[in-house]
Image (cartoon, grey):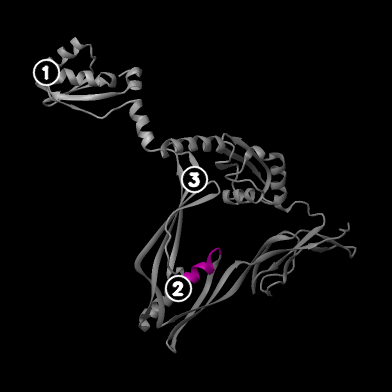
Amino acid sequence: MGIRSYLAGWREFTFARASRTAVFDAMFRAGIPLRHERTRGETTSVRIREEDVRGASLVLASLGIEAEIGERHGLPAALAFCRERPGIPLGLLLLAVWLRYSGGLVWDIRIEGNTKTPEAAIVSQLADLGFGIGTHWRETDFDQLHADYVAAQNDIAWLSVYMDGTVARVQVRELWADGARGDRTHTGANVVAGECGVIEEVNVFEGTAAVRAGDVIRPGEVAISGVIEKKDGGFRWEYAAGEVWASVPVPLSVEIPLERVERRPTGVEKTSFSLKIFKKSIKLSGNYGFDPATYDKIDTIGRICLPDGTPLPVWVEKTVWRETGTETVTLTADDAEAEARAQMRQLVREETEGGVLLEKSFRGSLRDGVWRLDGLLTVSRQIGVTREFAVEDEKS
């Protein structure tokens, strides 16, 4: 059907296939055009404009042919549908207004050029400066934003934000590994021990070693000094840097009671949903009257994207409340020992990460209904920690 038929509206007539010739002849003589003929099994369907429906019905009645007349289609049907549901045109109007308004807001932030600084940290810092998703970007002084960002942290040397439609594209240039030091004209540093241990090796990058292999060092004691004595008896200052490797004693302990009270899920769950648009949250469901103390809360959030993957400034927040109850659990001594050893293995992995395990010893005991496992590790690891100090006037 053409534009005229859509504007005027149309209906579908369905009648017996055997009556096709008689129907077409009669409609031709009556000047009623038929369109979109379809044959399905023993029936034939045609489309007739709304303005010809009454005439077509009279023609069929004069022939004694029964026909099924379908629902009205086209613009009149659409208008009638909207009149019966006034919320639809109102919603479309509000959507148009919202799209026009939101065109001046930031819908998404995309970071480019960062290799060391996490995107989340950059987005968070921008938010602290008043720029984020939902910000009126036309009211933003981007030059001031760039300057404030660089001044507020020590990881990014240069930052630029420009708008690509409603997407804020953030280009950054990071400082080099040692760039965060900046101007050290009036700042010196020592490398001190962060833990107690026996020195194995000192690798000095700047400064001078204050200990040697075999020395026992305690937390806070200087391992690499930034105070350098000159031949004339004077001093100069450096920003000491280096690695201090030591064998460190690490005591560990795990206790597993044979009887304990645990919280376990009962199988009862309650779910609530919220819709977040820019910075506004709208609660969609889940107004439960229950004691949150007896439930575990699990929050998830998902961002809505267009079919092409473009993210929208809209998130669906889901909260699942899982009811829990208390239950007394009794373990055998063997079960408690197995659990203690499993926890001890995890502690050993954590304590030896980044180092080398040199020695280990364990001792278990059962006393007063508690299975206790004590361990002592000797771990070789880097214990040097930088401690800065102010230099009022560096003497040459």
Q: Which residue is at 35% across, 30% downward?
A: 78
- Residue 74 locus on image (x, y percent): 33, 25
Q: What residue type is labelled 2?
A: Gln
**Which residue is denoted by mark 2 in the rendering?**
343
**Picture coordinates of residue 269 (x, y %)?**
37, 63
Quarter of the image where the N terminus is located: top left
- Our reading of the magenta stretch's main secondary structure is helix
Q: Position of residue 4 (x, y in %)?
A: 34, 17
Picture disc at residue 72? none
Which residue is nearer to you in this view: 182 or 158? 158
Q: Quadrant of residue 225?
A: bottom right
Do the numbered discs 2 and 1 sit on residues whose CB atoms are within 8 Å? no
Instruction: Kindly report the distance in space between the C-alpha atoms of the residues bearing marks 1 and 3.
Output: 60 Å
Going by the numbered disc 1, the residue's amino acid type is Leu
Q: Circle 1 is placed at which residue position?
A: 63
At 24% from the left and 14% from the top, the residue drawn is 33
First of labels 2, 1 by sequence position: 1
Residue range (magenta): 345-354
- Tell me the element at label 2: helix
Mark 3 highlights which residue?
A: 314
